[in-house]
Amino acid sequence: MSQERKPITFNGPLEAGIRAVSILGAAYPRTYDLQRLVAFDHLLVHTGDIDGPANLHPPTPMHSAELLVRRKLVEQSLMLMMTRDLVVREITLDGIKYGAGENAATFLTSVSSSYLQALKDRATWLVSAFGDLSDDAFKRVMRRFFDKWVEEFQQIEKSLGGEA
């Protein structure tokens, strides 16, 4: 039996896992819950949209819709990275948190491509800018960006002849 395979883009579990390791490595020893990592995964490649370094990936129509499908991908990526001790999961009084695993630092120092270096640089910037925010403060920041994204959806809807 042959199953047709869909091509995997930069949004497969391996790529998302590398992004997660970059974020958690930059944040070490801090840990984050899944919700924060899903948001960070999106923001990491779109730092230009949040007044940071230029976006890592080229613009795509309605890239804000990516947030809607990231949760499962980030979960899969964390599980994959845990199998290589790049990510650890811990149970805390605040819930399940993820942190850099035992092999994360070695892995991150061994990557040398210009793309991966740019990814690590943006992860460092992202964690520096938003990593220490309380959950409530981070939600307020995300709400501000979400409001911009709603405007983006409305503009696209108008251009397609819909009502906004």
Image: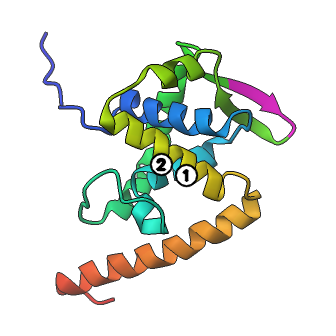
Q: Amino acid at mark 1?
A: Trp
Kindly indicate whether the residue at mark 2 contacts the one at mark 1 (C-beta within 8 angstroms): yes
- The correct choice, above or below, for 28 with respect to 1 in the image is below
Q: Secondary structure at mark 1?
A: helix
- Would you identify the image quadrant in which residue 112 lies? top left
Could you say where residue 122 lies in the image, as x and y percent from the top left?
Answer: 47, 48
User: x, y (%) of residue 145?
Assistant: 51, 71
The magenta stretch is 89-93
Q: Main secondary structure of the magenta part?
A: strand
Disc on res. 122: 2
Q: Is residue 120 left or right of residue 153?
A: right
Q: Which mark is residue 125?
A: 1
> Regarding mark 2 in the picture, which secondary structure is present there?
helix
Q: Is residue 55 magenta?
A: no
Q: How many numbered marks have been drawn onto this rendered protein structure?
A: 2
Position of the C terminus by quadrant: bottom left
In this rendering, is residue 64 above or below 56? below
Depicted 19 relative to depicted 127: above or below: above
CA neighbours of label 2 inside 10 A, class few (<14), some (14 to 19), many (20+)? many
Residue pictured at 32% horizontal, 38% vertical: 115
The residue at the point 48 percent across, 44 percent down is 121
**In the displayed structure, does residue 87 sit left or right of residue 14?**
right
